[in-house]
Amino acid sequence: MSEVTYLTKEGLKKLREELDYLMNVERPAISKQIGEAIEKGDISENAEYDAAKDAQGMLEAKMAIIQNKIANARILDESKIGTSQVQILNKVTIKNKKNNASMQYTLVPESEANLKEGKISVNTPIAKGLMGKKVGDVVEIKVPSGVIPFEIVEISI
């Protein structure tokens, strides 16, 4: 039984583009490397051939994983996301009650997390602590440096 992968439309589009690149650019390049290695003679002692075959195996495995994710993808409908309480795809502004620092994160599926863009996975300790909470709630979240109280300042889409 394959695991369901929750994605946004943008996330699914990126996966499809990555798969297309791997199939139409990377795969032919590796096939060419294998062909060139075979032309050099005895493949039983040919390091180039072994390396190309290993690369081909890893590429095929990566493509299979992506194909599986696409096949089992469920698209999150952003129009049905509310802001009364924290849930996936919400943009949440929180304030650290210890140092008054404010942060804003968008809670996204694991495969779309990107801290540089302010997108954190719903599986992170911070996101798990925020899920289901409302504006004004103070949540204590256990992080590597200890327990930090955060106040939910705003929930948006």
Image: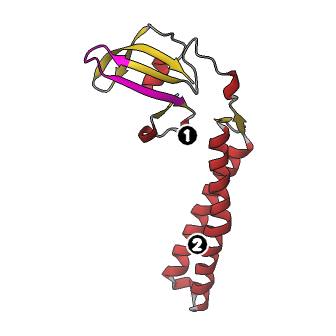
Residue 62 lies left or right of residue 124; in this view the side is: right
Residue holding disc 2: 53
Q: Is residue 40 magenta?
A: no
- The magenta segment is 95-107
Residue holding disc 1: 112
Q: Position of residue 64 (x, y in %)?
A: 67, 54
Which SS class for mark 2? helix
Residue 2 lies left or right of residue 137; in this view the side is: right
Q: Amino acid at mark 2?
A: Lys
Label 1 environment density (alpha carbons within 10 Å; few <14, some 14–19, many ≥20): some
Label 2 environment density (alpha carbons within 10 Å; few <14, some 14–19, many ≥20): some
Q: Position of residue 46 (x, y in %)?
A: 52, 84
Q: Amino acid at mark 1?
A: Glu
On the rendered image, what quadrant is the N terminus found in? Answer: top right
Q: Nearer the viewer, mark 1 or mark 2?
A: 1
Q: Main secondary structure of the magenta part?
A: strand
Looking at marks 1 and 2 on the same chain, the residue that comes earlier in the sequence is marked by 2
Q: Residue at x 47, y 16 (%)?
A: 154
Q: Residue at x 58, y 72 (%)?
A: 53
Q: Position of residue 101 (x, y in %)?
A: 30, 22
**Residue 43 sits in quarter:** bottom right
**Residue 10 sits in quarter:** top right
